[in-house]
């Protein structure tokens, strides 16, 4: 029985790391990420508190001011407006805006200066994925890779750059479509 506490020590250390990670991301005011998929799709993401984000990839722009989501396709010259609560929840932007603060984190593996963390989907979060697995650098919690798993498959991203608390203007979370753009408003 006196050895039981010794056997539980790794679990306690992992729990402390998960809590430290949650605190780090919970205290951020903003962040920016450049991620690359195995197919060489580059994804740029800027996130700020209050569920505001701007994501850009392959001629698509997805912006939320926390209330409205603007989804613009250059190729289609089409803008879809929706409420943020209905639209958020299918990709990497949700992970960095919501999941790290609300989901119970579990450390899966530690190796040198990296830690692999499981972020299962918690109750109350609407999402297109069930869980995310992040590999992070322990000294500064910089994400190195992100894997999103869901019923529709798995998305994998290598994080090329990450900035904590970059300066952001409110204008980054607004969108004015170019003239001639078809606008579809789903907020009604």
Image (spheres, helix red, strand yellow):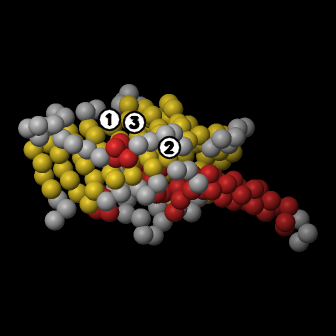
The span from disc 3 to disc 2 (Cα, nearest Å) is: 11 Å
Q: Is residue 13 left or right of residue 48?
A: right
Measure the alpha-carbon separation of dots 3 and 1.
7 Å
Locate residue 10 relative to residue 23 in the image: left or right.
Answer: right
* Residue at 69%, 59% in the rendered image: 15
Check whether the beta carbons of the residues at disc 2 and disc 1 lie within 8 A of each other.
no
CA–CA distance in space, label 2 to label 1: 17 Å
The residue identified by callout 1 is 57
- State the residue position of label 3: 44
For the residues carrying marks 2 and 1, which lies nearer the camera in this image?
2
Q: Which of the 4 image quadrants contains residue 46?
A: top left
Q: Identify the image quadrant of residue 182.
A: top left
**Closer to the camera, 57 or 41?**
57
In the figure, 81 relative to 171: above or below?
Answer: below
Image quadrant occupied by the C terminus: bottom left
Callout count: 3
Work out whether 141 lies above or below 161: below
* Relative side of 15 to 169, left or right: right
Disc 2: CA contacts within 10 A as few (<14), some (14-19) or many (>=20):
many
Q: Verify CB contact (< 8 Å) between mark 3 and mark 1.
A: yes
Residue 106, compared with residue 62, is above or below; it is below
Q: Mark 3 or mark 1: which comes first in sequence?
A: 3
Q: Which badge, 2 or 1, comes first in the chain's sequence?
A: 2
Tell me residue 108's x, y (percent): 63, 51
Q: Secondary structure at mark 2?
A: strand
Query: In terms of sequence position, does the residue under pointer 3 or pointer 2 come before the other?
Result: 2
* Residue underneath mark 2: 31
Of labels 3 and 2, the one closer to you: 2
- Tag 3: Cα neighbours inside 10 Å, few (<14), some, or many (≥20)? some
Question: Percent from the top left, x then y, of residue 99?
Answer: 48, 57
């Amino acid at each position: 029985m006196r050895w039981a506490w010794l056997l539980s020590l790794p679990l306690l250390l992992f729990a402390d790391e998960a809590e430290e990670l949650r605190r780090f991301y919970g205290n951020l005011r903003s962040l920016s990420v450049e991620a690359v998929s195995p197919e060489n799709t580059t994804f740029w993401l800027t996130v700020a508190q209050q569920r505001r984000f701007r994501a850009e990839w392959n001629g698509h722009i997805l912006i939320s001011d926390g209330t409205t989501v603007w989804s613009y396709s250059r190729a289609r010259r089409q803008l879809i407006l929706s409420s943020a609560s209905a639209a958020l929840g299918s990709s990497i932007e949700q992970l960095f805006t919501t999941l790290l603060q609300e989901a119970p984190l579990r450390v899966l593996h530690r190796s040198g200066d990296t830690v692999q963390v499981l972020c299962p989907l918690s109750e109350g979060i609407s999402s297109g994925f069930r869980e995310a697995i992040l590999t992070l650098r322990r000294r500064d919690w910089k994400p190195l890779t992100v894997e999103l798993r869901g019923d529709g498959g798995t998305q994998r991203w290598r994080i090329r750059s990450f900035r904590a608390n970059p300066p952001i203007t409110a204008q980054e979370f607004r969108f004015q479509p170019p003239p001639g753009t078809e606008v579809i408003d789903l907020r009604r």
